[in-house]
Image (tube, rainbow, N blue to C red):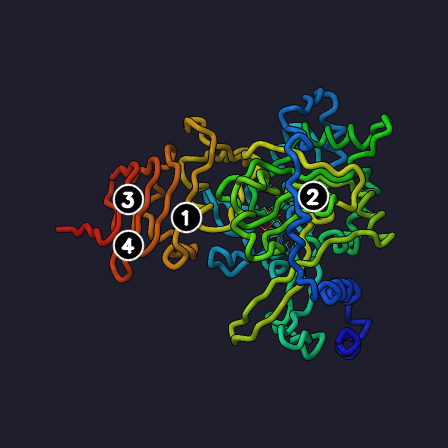
Amino acid sequence: RLTQYCQRLEELAPLGERPSLNVNFKHFLKLFTQYLENRSQSLTRDWVQIKPIPSDELPLYTSLSIVQSESFIPLLDKLVVVKLNGGLGTSMGCEGPKSLITVRNDMTFLDIVVKQIQYINSTYGSNIPLVLMNSFNTDQETKRIEERYKSRILFYTFCQSKYPRLEKETLLPLVSDITDHDISSWYPPGHGDFYQSYINSGLCDEFLKMGKEYLFISNIDNLGATVDLKILNYMHNQSNTSLGSKPCEFLMEVTDKTRSDVKGGTLVYDNGVKTLLEIAQVPKQYVDEFVSVHKFKIFNTNNLWVRMSAIKRLISNGSLHMEPIVNMKTLENGLKVIQLENAIGAAIKCFDGAVGLNVPRSRFLPVKTTSDLLSLLSDLYCLESSTGVIYMNPLRSFPSVPLVKLGYNHFGRLKEFLERFEDIPQMLELDHLTVSGDIRFGKNVTLKGTVIIIANPGERIDIPMGSTLENKVISGNLRVLDH
Ligand code: UPG
């Protein structure tokens, strides 16, 4: 089948056209071969071999030393910030790039990220560049607005690879021609594609020549992922260690896992090797175990600090290895397809001296769904418009994040979600919120403790203006009408 497949790709892809189309068949075939080789054992992991990482192997952020002020500029001058920006806002029912969704104070994710870097640069007199890794899904729209940032910071973009989707039954590509523009025939192969695409873009060499050494990479949807001098200093000191231990080429920020942490991965030992385990790789019968907070106590924030020269070495000697993730999809026409992807953190095992650092929750504010967005929009968080820094409201009496679950049918899409709140409820003392069904919130509503609101199918609940719900379960039909 593989031979047949390669022949077909060769027919489809005249060599000269490949680079401009960003289709890298060599790497696609490597991924596909890995998939075929492992298919008989199923691509999920051998669960018996998976062990959580003991917490004493993960240094604590609070144990990192304070940086002397004379080191600020030399350190920051070695840094490049990268945001993974290949994803769309589909998990919130939006069509364009997720980074362009307005989140708070009329600012998009990207506006806030740029503000954060601009603030660091103006405070310390540094000139940290921002690089966006776009995909063919996000490149055009992002480029359309990049001018507004270029006068404020050094702003670069590059586009990641584009791979053909495979029909599930035949394992043959959907594309009939390499120049096929039907977007549903292609996909960006996950953020693990960063390493290869970054090298291909030429930016790695350019930055190394400029004297840059470290990348701080994170998800564009995590506004807690700000430049941190203590972590950068730790990387730098470990990299330059002469004490015989291996220099730290890769640092993954992990954080204590909460019940909200479902979509993503955790750092584990697999057969004794430190690696990343993504939920998509967990055998079905173990998903509950993976999601619970009892066995796997930490979560990957996807905030990664990586030494650039190490990426160059691993790519040039072909020793970068990441397990494929098989993402099954059903297209609008009902066709079942698979897309083979890689996760960026899965490369941890390839780098020398790689560590997981346990960081405070404030460095992990992911916005995957409208439930996450509700928390971020509420008074649980404060956004400093001048610095772009987001932090938990100090008035919250306990530091944990509430568990918020909004039903997808009525709240899952951003537009409908916004229409259902006359304004965002006050949630400072909230512990757990479940909302399901046709529910609308009036102005000035306060939610405290555990609140569960469930409307029966076909019925509607209006939470009246000014109400305070504390440890309440509301269900059925509660319609407040004007008279
Ligand atoms: N992204 C790309 N290219 C792709 C796919 C995604 O740039 O081909 C970007 C995307 O825009 C986002 C980031 O990568 O900024 C993360 O993508 P997403 O699909 O949301 O990843 P998750 O499933 O949330 O998982 C990642 C890590 C996981 C970690 C989690 C933390 O894989 O280990 O726990 O982020 O939020």
As shown in the figure, which amino acid type bears the numbered disc 2?
Answer: Tyr
Going from the N terminus, do you reach mark 2 or mark 3 first? 2
Observer-side mark, 3 or 1, equals 3
In front here: 278 or 406? 278
| SS state under label 2 | strand
The answer to whether mark 4 and mark 2 are in CB contact below 8 A is no
Q: Say whether residue 417 is left or right of residue 51.
A: left
Cα separation between marks 4 and 2: 44 Å
Real-space CA distance between mark 3 and mark 1, rounded to the nearest whole angstrom: 14 Å
* Image spot of residue 431 (x, y percent): 39, 37
**Residue 134 image label:** none
| Residue bearing the label numbered 1 | 405
Helix, strand or loop for disc 4: strand
Horizontal and vertical percent for residue 168? 62, 73
Circle 3: element type: strand
Task: Point out the tag, 4 or 3, that comes first from the N-terminus.
Answer: 4
Q: In the image, which is nearer the foreground, mark 2 or mark 3?
A: 2
According to the image, label 3 marks what residue? 473
Q: Which residue is mark 2?
A: 269
The 10 Å Cα crowd at callout 1, few under 14, some 14 to 19, many 20 or more, is some
**Cα distance in 3D space between marks 4 and 3:** 11 Å
Along the viewing direction, whichever of 120 and 243 lies nearer the viewer: 243
- Label 3: few (<14), some (14–19) or many (≥20) C-alpha neighbours in 10 Å: few
Residue drawn at x 54%, y 34% as measured from the top left: 362
Q: Which residue is mark 4?
A: 455
Q: What's the CA distance linking mark 1 and mark 4? A: 14 Å
Q: First in sequence: mark 1 or mark 4?
A: 1
- Where disc 1 sits, the SS reads strand
Q: Residue at x 33, y 48 (%)?
A: 421
